[in-house]
Amino acid sequence: MTGRRAVAPLRPGWLIVDGLPVYHRVDLDAGATAPAIVHVHGFGISGTYLEPTAALLAPRYRTFVPDLPGMGRSHRPTEPLDLPGLARAVVAYCDAAGVGQATFVGNSLGCPILIELAARFPDRIDRVVLVSPAGGPNNQPLPRALRQMITGPDEADILQRGQLPGVGRRRQLSQSTRQVLALEDQQPGLVVLPRPRPHSRPAAARQLTPGDRHGNIPEHRHDRPAHR
């Protein structure tokens, strides 16, 4: 069973990735020669909330919205994945879906995953869009970072799924987010931060991405990419 109906024209389905069933939504009506776009969701949830944005872009792109391993409907790997593991999982999903190079759109945890992917697999990336990245100096010190994860209504689900980053993985978030600085030299990149946001400020975007493009969207939530 595929579960709930995806936002049209997306269609739900399953792929076997690294031996495990991965749930995704896909639309290929743009044609075999159209560029691919892959949407990567945030902490411990699913890609369902990315469907409206993906559906609007589907007429121009071959569109893919997976649930990361162990999140959403996708089956859980034996051991929780760190950021490099999640980046490899996204590449493995793309291999299974027949996606070579793509534009990647990430939100929250999806952003550090894509930064890791850009560093390790630069040939797989056409463009990167980072919407409200998780990690970085705005999630320091550690107690504040943990409080943000626990009190966030969606992020709290990560506690129930056994995917909570430990101190080492939280450090990976911070280090990977700072790697945004290198994106300008490797791939075209865009960073979008919502405003207001309790744990991010426009000044922080300038600090993280000098020379890169960044923007703020008023009245827009951290976990709800705009699709107007």
Image: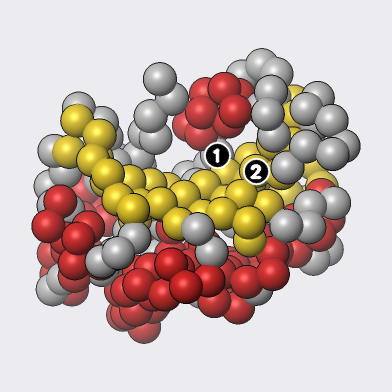
Q: Position of residue 40 (x, y in %)?
A: 54, 49
Quick one: 218 or 70, which is closer to the camera? 218
According to the picture, the residue beneath numbered tag 1 turns out to be 47
Which quarter of the figure has residue 18?
A: bottom right
Q: In this orientation, does residue 195 appear?
A: yes
Real-space CA distance between mark 1 and mark 2, rounded to the nearest whole angstrom: 14 Å
Specify whether 193 is left or right of 88: left
Which quarter of the figure has residue 31?
A: top right
Q: Position of residue 49 (x, y in %)?
A: 48, 31
Q: Amino acid at mark 1?
A: Gly
Specify whether 76 is left or right of 45: right
Quick one: 141 or 147, which is closer to the camera? 141
Q: Say few, some or many: other residues with alpha carbon within 10 Å of mark 2 (under 14 / 14 to 19 / 20 or more).
A: many
Q: Position of residue 209 (x, y in %)?
A: 29, 64
Residue 100, placed above or below residue 210: above
Q: In this orientation, does residue 79 appear?
A: no
Q: Say few, some or many: other residues with alpha carbon within 10 Å of mark 1 (under 14 / 14 to 19 / 20 or more).
A: many
Q: Residue at x 16, y 43 (%)?
A: 197
Quadrant in which the N terminus appears? top right
Q: Are marks 1 and 2 in contact (CB under 8 Å)?
A: no
Residue 4, placed above or below residue 205: above
Q: Amino acid at mark 2?
A: Ile
Q: Residue at x 57, y 22 (%)?
A: 56
Residue 220, placed above or below residue 22: above
Quick one: 212 or 8, which is closer to the camera? 212
Which mark, residue 37? 2
Of the numbered discs 1 and 2, the one sitting upstream in the chain is: 2
Specify whether 136 is left or right of 184: left
